Image (tube, rainbow, N blue to C red):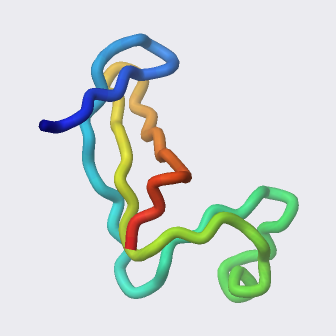
């Protein structure tokens, strides 16, 4: 059974899905640490696998990612 996430902004049901990276792992980097594409490897941040489960709200058009559910 698929779990249902509720949008924290609109209170509506969100669609569950996956964000896929192509060749490289996904990584979230804070703005103050962002040194551009070439130096991203040296920036500290939250590392994800090549894909991550996420929820999408069609009302506010936001994607929510649960950091604890880091995928491969």
Residue furthest front as drawn: 1
Q: Quadrant of residue 35?
A: bottom right
Q: How many marks?
A: 0
Which residue does the image show at 48% across and 46% down from the upper left? 65
Q: Is residue 32 left or right of residue 66?
A: right
Q: Quadrant of residue 45?
A: bottom right
**Quadrant, the N terminus:** top left
**Quadrant, the C terminus:** bottom left
Q: Is residue 21 left or right of residue 40?
A: left
Q: Is residue 48 left or right of residue 33?
A: left
Residue furthest left as drawn: 1
Q: Is residue 35 left or right of residue 14?
A: right
Give how far across and how far down residue 37 sits, in percent: 66, 80
Which residue does the image show at 28% across and 20% down from the upper left? 13
Q: Quadrant of residue 3?
A: top left
Which residue does the image show at 34% across and 28% down from the upper left? 5
Residue furthest right as drawn: 32
Give how far across and how far down residue 19 sits, in percent: 35, 59
Q: Is residue 46 above or below residue 12?
A: below
Q: Is residue 63 above or below residue 29?
A: above
Q: Is residue 3 above or below residue 32?
A: above
Which residue does the image show at 55% across and 52% down from the upper left? 67
Give how far across and how far down residue 31 sits, in percent: 79, 57
Give how far across and how far down residue 68 sits, in percent: 53, 52
């Amino acid at each position: 059974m698929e779990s249902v996430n509720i949008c924290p902004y609109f209170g509506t049901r969100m669609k569950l899905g996956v964000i896929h990276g192509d060749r490289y792992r996904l990584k979230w980097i804070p703005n103050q640490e962002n040194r551009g594409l070439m130096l991203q490897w040296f920036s500290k941040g939250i590392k994800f696998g090549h894909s991550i489960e996420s929820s999408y709200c069609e009302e506010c058009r936001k994607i929510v990612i649960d950091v604890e559910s880091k995928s491969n």
